Amino acid sequence: MPEITRDEVAHLADLARIDLSDAELDHLAPQLQVILESVASIQGLAGDDVPATSHPLPMTNVFREDVVVPGLTPEQALSGAPAVEEQRFSVPRILGDEQ
Amino acid sequence: MSIIEKTAAELIDALAAGETTSVELTQAHLDRIAAVDGDVHAFLHIDAEGALSQAAASDARRADGNALHALDGVPIAVKDVLTTTGLPTTCGSKILEGWIPPYDATVVKKIKAAGLPILGKTNMDEFAMGSSTEHSAYGPTKNPWKLDRIPGGSGGGSAAAVAAFEAPLALGTDTGGSIRQPGAVTGTVGVKPTYGSVSRYGLVALANSLDQVGPVTRTVLDSALLHELIGGHDPLDSTSTTTPVTGLVDAARAGATGDLKGVKVGVIKELAGEGWAPDVMAKFNESVDLLTKLGADVVEVSTPSFEHAMAAYYLILPAECSSNLAKFDAMRYGLRVTPDGDPSAEDVMKASRDAGFGDEVKRRIILGTYALSSGYYDAYYGQAQKIRTLIIEDFKKAFEQVDVLVSPTSPSTAFPLGAKLDDPLAMYMQDLATIPANLAGTPGISIPAGVSDVDGLPVGVQLLAPVLEDARLYRVGAALEAAIGPVLSIDKLEVAR
């Protein structure tokens, strides 16, 4: 039976950039275990002879003519930004002190 | 009959005949919203001013003989997962609270270009994850039939608005049943079109390979009218099909005459038995008998891989959503929570995503991250994609034998609010019958089959057709609807008349 431990949930949350509290970890980890046990039933069901489907309709890359079309103005693009500076998205520092 | 009880098709005639105006009927729906939405909570945002000004413009056009479309002037509600300029789009999430998109979804552009006044944005499970609308960060929608019951989900707001006669039409989205299951439990009609036949541009993605926009209405004909309006190729959606979306209204009108001679219908063997409520099965079986009486040739069809559809779905969907929802990073739009001290961008992301996402969204993001992790990818995501192939093959084999498939839409009638909120698996089971169509890209419709003999709540019957054969749903659906007779009426609802 597959297992998803509390520590593993904490690690996955870290990868997914969600700062889960201890209480949330206690709450979510057992629920994820139950869901995982249920979906794990498909392991090994289909053999190597079955191709994978990633998309319901067979499609290849779709291109358009390389022509200029109107896009968002800078004001529109920035209209939902939490912080703006000099017509740019203003974000917190992206490097740590040691970097 | 008051004006809000009229179907969209009847409103088209009334507007054309000059018996009413768009302002009059838009105001009537706004009055209804004001009267009942405090109880139902179908809407997250109501745009009375905008809707009335669109209605006035519609009336002016019509007076000049310049109506843009048959539905010009008929008001509509829009699920809050579709972007709308000038109106908030929250997806039922705190992370998008107050966000006003700088562009319209293509389907929204189309309804605006056809002159339909937009009444407001409807409630939904957060980012369309759920089957009860209880995962909305803004509180649940109630089922207008019985206010302590769920209205289905994720599109419970659109279904409840239409069921409560707050709107004649609504737009929904269906990733695993989010149009059809709410339709079933509210006694309304909901259609999930063929994947790619309605643009997804401006639909905030839950799972790109599964999502589809579709109509939510009170009759099959009304769904056909709205479906034809929103369907068709969109250069802005690279997964958009180029086949024209036509013939649906004609199919619905032809079906309403009631003759199904020569139509082969397959009852899906796997979507019955354990876990299916007897009162639901009783109504479903009545619908199957009616199909036979209408002249259809009804046989049983087996689709063995459907048994694994739910497991495959709950790997594919979380995998896609964990990637899709990575864009909510607190940098360019949406909620930004800044922890104390000197936080880095990553600290801000983590704090914002923890504060902005609800439990179900977190569960699915973490499950998806797990399924895509190295070491688990082949065992989970890879297997799920293969099961998807088997499901597509089962559909193909089934449609070699029959023209349409039929099943109950949902395993039970509307359950009490709170009943499954902390039991994610029980909630997921609601979508057993609807998920296969999303995995295969095939179209599906849910129509009211009647009300349960046990609790008096509506039961839905689902029809499924091959890819791009949506017209079959309308022909058979309209015939069955006519044979069943009206299920939803304003006097049956618990909300005030």
Image (tube, rainbow, N blue to C red):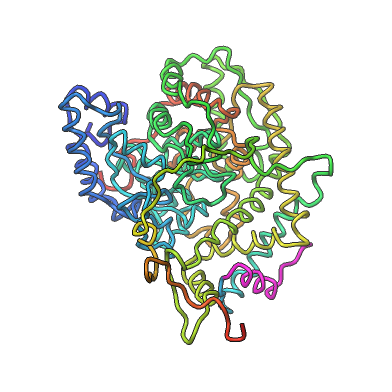
- Which quarter of the figure has residue B371? bottom right
Viewer-proximal residue among B448 and B169: B169
How far across and how far down the image is residue B310, in percent? 65, 47
Question: Looking at the rendering, in which quadrant would you find the C terminus of chain A?
Answer: bottom right
Q: Is residue B479 above or below residue A64?
A: above
Q: Quadrant of the N terminus of chain A?
A: bottom right
Residue B58 quadrant: top left
Q: In this view, does A62 lie to the left or right of B115?
A: right
Query: Where B277 falls versus B369 (above or below)?
Result: above
Q: In this view, does B363 lie to the left or right of B484?
A: right
Question: Looking at the image, which residue is at 78% across and 52% down?
Answer: A43
Q: In the image, is residue A4 part of the stretch drawn in magenta?
A: yes
Percent of width and height locating residue B464: 57, 31
- Left or right: B266 as drawn, with respect to B255: right
Q: Which residue is drawn at 37% across and 66% down?
A: A87
Where is residue A16 drawn, in percent x and y?
A: 60, 67
Residues drawn in magenta? A1-17
* Picture quadrant of residue B241: top right
- Residue at the extreme right of the image, as rendered: A48
**Closest to the observer, A17 or B132:** A17
Question: Which residue: 75% across, 49% down?
Answer: B383
> Is residue B399 rendered to the left or right of residue B114?
right
Is residue B83 in the magenta section?
Answer: no
At 69% from the left edge and 37% from the top edge, which residue is drawn? B391
Give x and y (percent) for residue B139: 39, 61
